[in-house]
Image (cartoon, grey):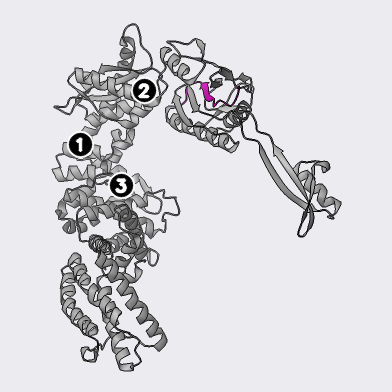
Amino acid sequence: MTGEAMPDLLIELFSEEIPARMQARAAQDLKTLMTDGLVEAGLTYAHAAAFATPRRLVLALEGLSARSPDLKEERRGPRADAPEKAIEGFLRGAGVARDDLELREEKKGSFYFAVIEKPGRAAPEIVAELLERTIRNFPWPKSMRWGAGSLRWVRPLHSILCILTDDEGAEVVPLEIDGITAGNVTRGHRFMAPDAFSVSSFEDYAAKLKRAHVVLDPEERAEAIRHDAEHLAFAAGLEVVADEGLLREVAGLVEWPVPLMGEIGAQFLDLPPEVLQTSMKEHQKFFSVRNPSTGRIERFVTVANRETADDGATVLAGNQKVLTARLSDAKFFWENDLRVARDGMKPWLQQLENVTFHAKLGSQAERIERIATLARELAPAVGADADLAEQAARVAKADLSSEMVGEFPELQGLMGRYYSEAAGLPEEVALACEEHYSPLGPSDAVPEAPVSRAVALADKIDTLAGFWAIDEKPTGSKDPYALRRAALGVIRLVLAGGLRLPLAAADGPLARAFAGHAAGTAPEGASADLLSFLHDRLKVHLREEGIRHDVIDACLAMEGADDLALLVRRAQALSDFLKTEDGENLLQGFKRANNILTQAEEKDGVEYSFGADAKFAEDPAEKALFAALDAERPAIDAAMKAEDFAAAMSALARLRAPIDAFFEAVQVNADNAVLRRNRLNLLSRIRTLCLDVADLRRIEG
């Protein structure tokens, strides 16, 4: 490298095919390890980008400093009269000779000083050292050793390209790892352009790769696949079923994507679309193409890794052959399953007697029994027919024994709906089979049908109560039975349906669910502990909706905190109130009243809780506050009774001005004992009135 130009760095690690699922992470790791290491070694850079194809990991850096800066460091050593051993130790630590030390006079005597100079290093030297360390310690999820060397890589590594380019040209960074010497050479597409070629910069590299049938950028490959697939489908009057996960994966399987559209055999077109889609995606990485007017899946798009003389005809023929074999299996499962379903699904339900749900919680059949009982009891609260809710719960898990779900577990629930329809069961029951697993995560839709809601709630509450009964709760980040997800599911079902469901009532859902689990064996306090777990999940859920945890705590302290819909309405109203100027000021007034009261009660050893009398009021502000409290008390009581929390907050807001005026004008701890006691009892009226709405003591600030 000449002068102080800022060179660009290009690295390519060229290997056998890297599994698609590892590529994006590996490109990111290469970028992080190299850029962090360069900065640590004292080099700076302007811009970094990483790319991955099935056969290469690439890092391109712009504007790298040509060398690291010279460093000068001073270290103060021992005193001049220190023992020889101490001086020798200092020399060793600083890496300097005795002659290099300087003696300097300071207030406390004369001391030895060492000036350590570290000359900067050239970029190629730093890059070579760092790249070797990065390659040898690369964090692949799995890696293999091959050949004679000790190097491990995800698949055999063939070559390393590493060049620094500036205005004078390109220079290969000298580096050799286990017999692989870095160079400026790479290869194109495995079949379409396998010859080696040299490159002189990133622009040159990207352009030559494109000519050699390699699209370097995974985003560009994904877009090309999306565009061409949609184009092929559109030309046939069809549409591609969107699948972002599959698109990313397929973009990681090819360097030169060539989408081809093929036919699905007529004998398979009556399979449920989800079965076709899952089978083609899982086994072949095919995109499904559907007829928008019927919803049926009629064709597929596969992505070849090369252009062929026959425009992909041979590739498609091979793919269609394998697909026919796969779909024949699916058709066989489907037809067998339909026979069992039309016969009432009894063999499946019997099989579930032999399937353990959990060693301490019995079989799936016993679990179904509990869920059916609970669904029946929950039905009135969710507006569902009790008989239908129980019937749905009894068949909701039947498809777990079916051959189709055995092959494709991700279709559980959905197949249950198809089989219930085939069995001639009511529509609500069939829908509940599909929907009772929902919501599976924060973005999953919440079922709206009442029967589905009853079974979904029963399923999740039974799961939670069961694991609490055997004391298997989530710890730290570990949650093997997805109990946090079940708790969030309960919360979302309750909130989305506006369900009034006092969970912890004596004969409420939690008590009934615990009773269903071998009565009386649950550890003491399990129900209260489970409720507080639900409250914790609710806090996380509401924090995402912008409600602070202290606001929720203020509402949790109130009666009826196990009625989650009520709790959330109260928290929402309080949150809105505290965002207003009146709310903010009333909170300060409440805190002031509460502080004065608490101190007085501690000092006097009594509780000031009643007996405030307007006839002892002296100051006009004091009289006005009595009048305001008298006026707003009935309004607040009525609003709280009607659960109209916004109205209760409005009434509190009207107290803000008289409370402010009272504190401006009146000294509470007056010398006159009667006046003081009366004023403290008046503050107690403020405290009680506020605490009847929410526990404002828990609000911060």
Residue 520 in sight from this viewpoint: no
Which residue position is annotated with label 1? 418
Classify 10 Å Cα crowding around label 3: few (below 14), some (14-19), many (20 and above): few
| Disc 2 crowd, CA 10 A, few/some/many (<14, 14-19, 20+) | many
Report how many numbered discs are placed on residues in the image.
3
Q: Where is residue 529 in the image (x, y as percent from the top left)?
A: 37, 63
Q: Residue at x 51, y 11 (%)?
A: 196
What residue does disc 2 label? 221
Q: Nearer the viewer, residue 197 or 92?
A: 92
Q: Can you give x and y, in whole percent of width and height, for residue 105 in the image?
A: 78, 54
| Along the viewing direction, whichever of 356 and 76 lies nearer the viewer | 76
Q: What residue type is labelled 2?
A: Arg
Instruction: Please give left or right for residue 61 compared with residue 336 in the image.
Output: right
Amino acid type assigned to the residue bearing label 3 in the image: Pro
In whole angstroms, how far apart are the C-alphas of marks 2 and 1? 37 Å
For label 3, the residue is: 442
Task: Name the quadrant containing residue 98.
Answer: top right
Q: Distance between the residues labelled 3 and 2?
A: 31 Å
**Residue drawn at (19%, 54%) of the image:** 497
Instruction: Select label 1 or label 3 by which is in front.
Output: 3
Along the polypeptide, which appears first: circle 3 or circle 2?
Answer: 2
Q: Residue at x 29, y 77 (%)?
A: 687
- Of badges 2 and 1, nearer the viewer stands 2
The answer to whether one can see residue 533 in this image is yes
Which stretch appears magenta?
Answer: 1-18
For the residue pair 355 and 228, the one nearer the viewer reads as: 228
Q: Which of marks 1 and 3 is nearer the N terminus?
A: 1
SS state under label 3: loop
Give the x, y percent position of residue 224.
32, 21
In the image: residue 664, left or right of residue 169: left
